[in-house]
Image (cartoon, helix red, strand yellow):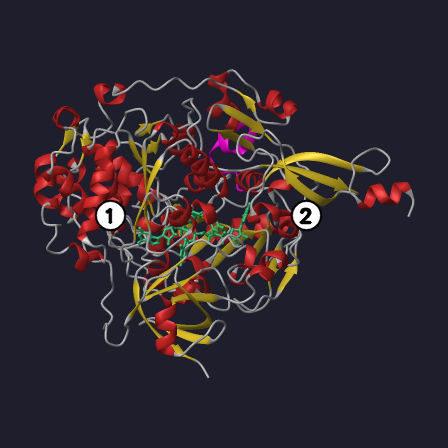
Amino acid sequence: MTELERKIKAKIPGPDTGIEVRHTICDICSPGMHCGINAYIKDGKVIKIEGIDGHPSNDGRLCTKGLSNRQYIYREDRVLTPLKRVGKRGEGKFEPITWDEAYAEIAKGLNAAKAKYGAESVAFYSGYSKWYRQMLRRLAYAFGSPNYGCESSACYTAAFMAWKVAAGEQGRPDMANSDLFLGWAFNPFYSSYMKARRAMALKEKGLKFLIVDTRRTPASEKLADLFLQPRTGTDGALAHAIANVLIQNGWIDKPYIDKYVYGFDEYAEYVSQFNESNIEQLTDVPYSQVVEAAKLIHENKRISCNESSAPLCHHRNGLQNYRAVMALTAITGNFDRKGGQLLSPHSYMHVGCGWEAHEHQYLYETRPKNVKDPVGAPRFPLWNYLEGEMQAMDMPRQILEGTPYPLRAVFALGMNARMFPNSGRMFKALESLDFFVDTDLFMTDAAKYADIVLPACSSFERGEFKPYPGGTAWYTSPAIQPLGQAKSDTDIVTELARYMDLPDEQLKEGYESFVQKYILDDLGFTVEQLKKVDLPIPVCKPEPHVDYQELDKGLKTPTGKFELKSAIMENHPEWGLDALPTYKDPLDGADPEKYPFMFTSGSRIPNAIHSRLHGVPANRSLRPVPTADMNNEDCEALGVKDGDRVTISTLRGSVTVNVHPTHTVPEGLVNLYHGYSEADANSLLDENHLDPYSGFPAYRSTRCAVKKEG
Ligand SMILES: Nc1nc2c(c(=O)[nH]1)N[C@H]1C(S)=C(S)[C@@H](COP(=O)(O)OP(=O)(O)OC[C@H]3O[C@@H](n4cnc5c(=O)[nH]c(N)nc54)[C@H](O)[C@@H]3O)O[C@H]1N2
Ligand SMILES: Nc1nc2c(c(=O)[nH]1)N[C@H]1C(S)=C(S)[C@@H](COP(=O)(O)OP(=O)(O)OC[C@H]3O[C@@H](n4cnc5c(=O)[nH]c(N)nc54)[C@H](O)[C@@H]3O)O[C@H]1N2
Ligand SMILES: [Mo]
């Protein structure tokens, strides 16, 4: 082997090897992360990736998901041209067409639905990806439809709504200055490795952790000073019982409550029902541990809690359960206090970076007036009041039932039909549409139902704006050319708006113009400046926090106070929702004799993210077969060993998977990861088992039966 061949094999960059290192981001998980990547490029192809040293998110590291990027962007089922369906819906038969033909077909399909049923009969939907959403929303509005909606109908927004109800805005944990962290459903070791590293570093420095999880996890083993293990979906009862002990013992901040908290007396009376007499029966947590948790809170001054984007809210009582947890920070005087829960100005895409941008204005200024309510509004009035967008969980019902008005066409960026509870029904809904466009990197099961499939490109193939907490920002440039004819989602939206000549000049100016005018102008930075640096740079200096400043100014709640009792809900008795964070049993109505186990799905595994990484060879090899975790004792009683096949059934359906006996789940619980085509956890769930406050599905609490196969 020559020296040059050796260098090429070792992937050493340089003019002689033709290998160049370019910067990009990992867009596989949430905008809260977007880690920096060095992409090693040879002959226009990514041949190696690694984390960027000094990057504010990952400082040189990548997690299992991040490391999959190379195989992810080159997945074999990448869509490379616009496609037109030539077979039956779902069959997967398409022929390539040009972009112009695609735009013409889309304009025709969407306008036909508009002419026949009105603009509101067209929904604009986004899957998990978030970076283009502002423009998709404006596309819906420019078209005249109120029906923009997204995957956040099942993720994060319920927690955000809980904060809006209580405090008017999102409260974030000031973990670095806390004495105790209430890690409620907190296992970043699998969902967010960088957060886990920070938590471990803070533990070293003395931060204490209360970990509350239905399962044993790395967090319960490595972080917990006290670990409580409630039954799935019973967290509201548990938090109330802890609050009751705090109140009974006077371990609360009375002057703070008197000044800044609304509804305390009624709340205190309500939580007194959760006590020694019933808490173990309600939650499986012994009362002695409830008292221990209250003591831990009392002994530590500064207390914060995590923003649970998913598990706490994935129950039909989810939003209320999260309110119950948040209340613990308020009654101990920790909201708007250093080391507690802080408000931070919303800069961009839910990332608080220290400056207040005009994203909200961009999102809402063109919202059509005098149009029908968005999908889901009558069923989920609090959602509609706080979010004003479609609650997508009601979309399949409205497509199939046509009430309160017909929904006949969907324009989607990243539709995963398996995300919906009773996912088979979502496929039926897609099948019944007059017109369906899906835009994705991959030929997914949902895309097979589309009339037109558009090829989206990955973060490696596009440029985008990224701010980070702490006041840095970046505008990336493409590291490689788009694969085939793929385009960035924002270019697709811009070009479609232009092709259809929709009445929104700002939208038609495209993504860079939006970022410049609405996000950067006030900062005094330009897109060009940021692009030139090609790495995150400081763009502002976040103001230091001043205790109680926001409370003194008055929160953006009807009373200006932190509301334990929601004045919004009090003012809307017609919604039939409780103003206090009341607790209700999470389970569905299935007969416990026939369905003796509880089913929870979706707890994160390091090697998968929803539907996307099961198709990446390296990730798939780490867990080749869909596998349910069950307690050792339960497995023994069923007579199954590791790798045996079991069928899990609910009132809705059944899936057959491998079983893994483990002590990490308690007796009576079955835990299965979602997103697999061949064993779809969400095919087991009832489409009506939803939280009436948020519309969120109960992914984590359904009764099931388990049977040994063959
Ligand atoms: N049972 C169960 N179900 C769950 C959950 C659970 O815990 N349990 N979790 C819920 C939660 S929290 C979430 S966030 C949702 C996940 O939400 P989903 O929308 O189901 O997420 P993904 O499957 O990751 O991505 C959706 C699609 O977007 C495509 N995509 C990726 N990047 C891009 C892009 O840049 N442009 C375009 N146009 N498309 C792109 C992907 O290829 C994929 O087909 O699942 C929910 N479903
Ligand atoms: N590897 C990987 N990382 C991901 C994702 C992924 O799919 N894969 N998805 C991303 C997305 S979209 C999201 S929303 C976040 C979610 O991030 P997390 O909220 O961290 O996600 P989970 O692992 O689902 O839940 C955390 C813990 O909550 C516990 N839990 C489940 N139900 C309950 C309950 O009722 N009560 C209590 N107390 N605990 C419960 C679970 O056992 C789990 O250990 O992760 C993100 N990161
Ligand atoms: Mo999520």
Q: Which residue is mark 1?
A: 321
Residue type, numbered disc 2: Gln
Q: Is mark 2 within 8 Å of ligand 1?
A: no
Residue at disc 1, secondary structure: helix
Sequence-first disc among 1 and 2? 1
- Secondary structure, mark 2, is loop
State yes or no: residue 559 in magenta: no
On the question of residue 683 being in view, the answer is yes
Name the kind of residue labelled 1 in the image.
Asn
Q: Which mark is residue 364?
A: none
Question: What's the residue at 8%, 39% (across, down)?
Answer: 266
Q: Nearer the viewer, residue 294 or 54?
A: 294
Question: What is the crowding at mark 2: few (fewer than 14 residues within 10 Å), some, or many (at least 20)?
Answer: some
Q: Which residues fall within the magenta stretch?
A: 500-513
Residue 582 in percent (x, y) is at 16, 48
Quadrant in which residue 548 is drawn: top left
Is 346 or 68 nearer to us in this picture? 68
The x, y position of residue 692, in whole percent, is 24, 52
Using the rendered view, name the quadrant where residue 425 is placed. bottom left
Q: From the image, tell me which residue sits under label 2.
A: 485
